Image (cartoon, coloured by chain):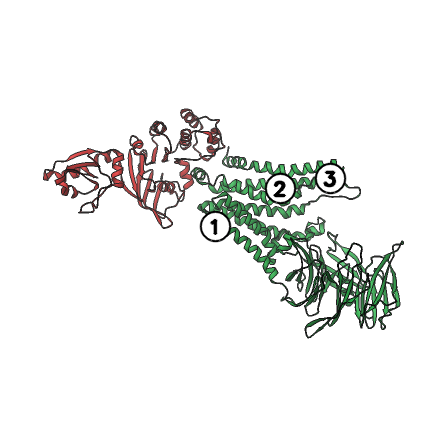
Chain colours: A red, B green
Amino acid sequence: MNDQPAIEVRAVTKSFGKKPVLNGVDLSVPAGQTFAFLGRNGAGKTTTIRMLLGLLKPDGGQIRVLGLDPAVDALEIRRRVGYLAEDQAMFGWMRVEQLLSFMAPFYPTWDAARARELADKFQLPMKTRTKHLSKGQGVRLGLLLALAHRPKLVILDDPTLGLDPIMRKEFLRDLVTYLQSEQVTVFFSSHLLYEIEPVADAVAILDRGRIMRQSATEELRQHVKRLIVPADAESALLGLPGILDFVRSGRQVSAVVEDADAALRALAPAGTRVEEVDLNLDEIFEAYVIGNRPPPGGRPNGEPHLEKVA
Amino acid sequence: MKQISAIIWKEWHDVRWFLAVALLLFIGMPVVGAIENRFTYSTGFDFNASPWVIPLGGILAILTAIGITYSDLGDRLEDFWRSRAINPLRWILIKYFVGLGVVLVSCIVPLLLELRIGNLRSTTFGTISINNQINAATILLFTPLWIVLYSIAFLCGCVILRTAHATMLALAGMLLIYFLPMVLPFMNWLSVDAQPDWLMNSDQLHWLLGVPIRLGYTGGMLAIATIALLLSLIAIKRNWRIISGTRMMYWSIGSTLVLLFSTAAFQLGTNLPVLQQFDLPAGEHVRLIRFNGAHGMIITSADPIEANHAPQQSLQLIDLKDDRLTLGPPIKLPPQSLPFGGQACAFRDHVLYSVFQQMLMDKTFTSELRSTDLNGSLTAKSVTVLHSLNPFIGIFLRDQRLFMLTGDKLAIFDIHVPSEPRLISEEKVAWGHVSNQGSSYSQGMYTKFQYRLPLIPGFSERELLAIILREPPYERTLAGNAVAIAFEDGLLTYKLDRIKDGGAYFTLAGSYQPPSLLERIFGNSQVVLVGSQHAVHASQKNNVPGKDMEGITVFGIDDPAHPRPVAHFAVPSAHPLIVEPLPDGRAIVGGDQLFLLGKPSM
């Protein structure tokens, strides 16, 4: 495994007109990992990915993809990177085999045998025009195109968007089977967290143009937890650092904290009874993105966004 | 498959239907026409593709360019190929040239076929050879235009996101490319329509003479195409896109039309000032104007009441005093006083006029000189002159002498008693247009020509040259050392090399095609007359729907190599305008009305 990060993003900013989209994004994707890039619609995920591929230029900051600058070596990056976009369109009049033949010359590392093998695995009808493929077949064909040149890095931008749940599961099965076994770095952008959770080694949460958190998935699950305390311990709970979400519920109050171990240590001297709840990636993401946070040293403003029961 | 081959294959697939449709239209339809003619008229195989290709080639270029760009430059599909390891500039360049190739093949191959078939064909209608309509010069002229139109449409396709809007803008661009160089004199060299007709002449001399013009035109057009291509590449590289809206389209196309029509309106706005205007009796129009700078006459003619009925003609004396023109009372002339070709002049209280009488069996002509007083009484005496060659009859006065010049005779009359002109001499003279260098393409179109002058005692050679030039059939104007020849589709200027020993020698100096947008859109130009010291006045007939317009264009020929229009005058008239230039640059103009026009600001 290479020590050099597959993707390195430092203080990247980007605005469209007067509207800021990315506001100092920092990101580092280690080589060989499956990296989940999480964010709500409009958070800036696709903008970030387009900059990684050299399709957009950042206003500020630095980007390195496989050690190359996309602003300078966009074509070389695209040769080495496999990319599957959300709801991807292809030349509809081409048959699947024609599309494969057409794309092959642009990739020096194109592996025709692998392409055929993937086509068989994905059960793609080679004689069918791409416009006549089903949604699932289209996504699989996109994946094939992203993999046939044996890329070092695969960037998937919400590839399962529009697929039904069965298709999404099949796609993820293919992804797990054919990507992780190849030690390929996968940069997987999605907002459907439950589908990415089983396969993601690390995650980054992007919200309003900023990276809210980046860490290994397991580490995130270990650290980010919901703590539930009696209502009379609310002030002690609010005094904790790194509260992402705060909810009052009857005689209890609960808070999602960034570092549960540190929080428990801080609450221990007062003898507060604390219930510790593990969160899934979906809940962690929600806490980061729409959590009801108290202002520094104070009480949360207004009512919580979501009334939660611990 | 290599990258370039892959892209060419892909692009070819996108535009092959354009080629198929174009060839079906540009070759198929002429073949159908040729077959029909062959069976209907028993002619040869008249394959005429040019009537299809010339007017529709530009449209094909635009549709092909839009067609080849829109398929790949729309939203998600663009994201697809842009995110692949495809060099976008290489892609667009290949796309451009594949589409251009389709356009040029679609347009040029049918024309080459016409050229080839036309050249192979010997005679079609008896002894009259209807040779190929098209020639290599025409193909050379139109090819750059198609390239430019394709390139501009390609740029629109690359920059404008919506196909319909890109097409509309490209069509607006076509209007500008076609009409703007036509209506703006300084851009005429870029106009496909304003190129001199002799450029189409395929003889070696004209071919060589046309090289600088072709180079300028082709270079200019290719420069525009190259700029459009470069802008397309930059737009693709930088991902420049205009998300057009309806309002933007209205503004763009509206601006184009406003630009074009305001330019045309500018031409009308430069109308010569009307200093005086006289209405004529209903149904009458000016038939002839003669003026010596202070005195003269007009002859008006009424529209015939019925066919073959001699029109009633009237005469009015005119005087110019204190910059004001005054008209005398109308005097009815005897019937058929001034039939076609007749000339007249006023002397004291009489009008003397020539009448072409008849052609005899031996192909000689007879003409008469008649005289009438201001009461309209025909004098009893008329003088008959026999002459041959063309029935040209010019009459001019000097020192109580009237000179009648015919095709091969000079008759001199003593008119000190104007009611009784007396023939005092009649002799054969040889004069006229005697030699040319360079073959002609249209009437009067030579690279060099020479006039032999009729030597008449008391007249200088230069005076005689001016006299014979201004009358039919030449209708040419000597201005300084240049002569301007107005022909039906434009103006040619020749430099007077020398005038010596009864000969005047001229060399082609420049040319001009009437550029008025309205003239081009609405009618055929027909230049009917003459000029003055520094300008040539030419009248053109414009068939504006619903109203007959007559116009005059005044050309500045102080630089004979670059004749240029300096003023216009347009007026509703059912009859061609007659122009009598005055020495100071003003002009008396007659049509359905009579005008005294101010001089053009040169």
Characterize the local packing of mark 1: few (<14), some (14-19) or many (20 or more) Cα atoms within 10 angstroms.
few
Characterize the local packing of mark 3: few (<14), some (14-19) or many (20 or more) Cα atoms within 10 angstroms.
few
Return the residue nearer the eye: B238 or A16: A16
Q: Name the chain letter of the residue that bears numbered label 1.
A: B
Return the residue nearer the eye: A192 or A224: A192
Report how far apart the C-alphas of labels 2 and 1 lie in the structure: 33 Å
What amino acid type should be assigned to the residue bearing mark 1?
Met
Q: Position of residue B138 (x, y in %)?
A: 66, 47
Report how far apart the C-alphas of labels 1 and 3 lie in the structure: 52 Å
Q: Nearer the viewer, mark 2 or mark 1?
A: 1
Q: Name the chain letter of the residue that bears numbered label 3.
A: B
Q: Position of residue B291 (x, y in %)?
A: 74, 68
Q: Name the chain letter of the residue that bears numbered label 2.
A: B
Q: Please tell me whether mark 2 sits on a helix, a strand or a loop.
A: helix
What amino acid type should be assigned to the residue bearing mark 3?
Leu
Report how far apart the C-alphas of labels 2 and 3 lie in the structure: 20 Å
Residue highlighted by disc 2: B107
Q: Sequence order check: which comes first, mark 2 or mark 1?
A: 2
Contact flag, marks 1 and 3 (Cβ < 8 Å): no
Residue highlighted by disc 3: B120
Q: Position of residue B395 (x, y in %)?
A: 81, 65
Quadrant of res A137: top left
Q: Which of marks 1 and 3 is in front?
A: 1
Quadrant of res B39: top right
Residue highlighted by disc 1: B248
Q: Can residue B481 be seen in this view?
A: no
What amino acid type should be assigned to the residue bearing mark 2?
Cys
Characterize the local packing of mark 2: few (<14), some (14-19) or many (20 or more) Cα atoms within 10 angstroms.
many
Q: Position of residue B385 (x, y in %)?
A: 87, 62
Return the residue nearer the eye: B544 or B442: B544
